[in-house]
Amino acid sequence: MADISVGKEVLSHCNKCKLALAHIVVTMKTKSTLGKVECKTCGNTHAYKDPSKVKAKKSQTGGTKRAKSATKQSISDLWLVAVNQASSKSQPYSIRACFKLGDIIDHPKFGPGVIERLIDADKIEVIFRHEIKTLMHNK
Ligand SMILES: [Zn+2]
């Protein structure tokens, strides 16, 4: 570091910002050693701290990851819970049949499903193992 002097810009670790940021040299300890520096971001003046000697603390931004996996968990888990809670015997799905909430149906294409929601007089929301489908009934 040859050309370090008061008024020059230097990269230092900032205690306030907790980052390696550009600082302005305020004082020099010796001709080649930095004394105090002023953070250009927060304006805080403090002793120079070599950013390469400051160990980065473990990232505190771990929150976003969990939210994503929580939504992915969904369907097969919901399906399992719904099937276990359903009291009725499974019945073959037919557009002419009339289903109730919680009924288990056996769909030729999607397999066993549980009536999750009655959308309309002739529409039901059924949760299958891999997807939730809206089906017709009561026709
Ligand atoms: Zn700062």
Image (cartoon, grey):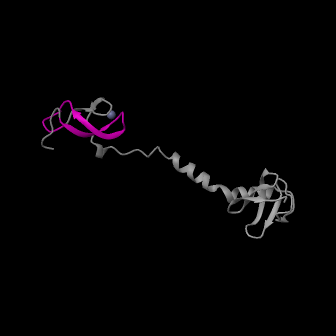
Q: Position of residue 71 (x, y in %)?
A: 61, 52
Against 27, residue 106 (above or below) is: below
- Where ligand 1 lies, by quadrant? top left
Image spot of residue 75 (x, y percent): 67, 57
Please identify the quadrant where the N terminus is shown: top left
Query: Which residue occupies 12% across, 43% down?
Result: 2
Q: Residue at x 22, y 34 (%)?
A: 24
| Residue 108: quarter of image | bottom right
- Please indicate whether residue 70 sits to the left or right of residue 102 in the image: left
Which sits in the foreground, 72 or 100? 100
- Answer with left or right where residue 33 lies relative to residue 119: left
**Residue 65: x and y, percent?**
52, 50
Q: In the figure, residue 78 lies in which quadrant?
A: bottom right
Corner quadrant of residue 16: top left
Instruction: From the viewer's side, name the closer residue of 34 and 106.
Output: 106
Identify which residue, 97 or 73, lies in the foreground.
97
Membership of 18 in magenta stretch: yes
| Magenta stretch encompasses residue 79 | no
Q: How many marks overall?
A: 0
Viewer-closest of 1 and 97? 97
Residue furthest to the bottom in view is: 108
Counting from the top left corner in percent of width and height, residue 80 is at 74, 59
In the displayed structure, 34 sits above or below 124; it is above
- Position of 121 with respect to 130 (left or right) is right
Magenta span covers which residues? Answer: 8-33
Q: Going by the picture, which residue comes out furthest to the front?
A: 139
The image quadrant where one finds the C terminus is bottom right
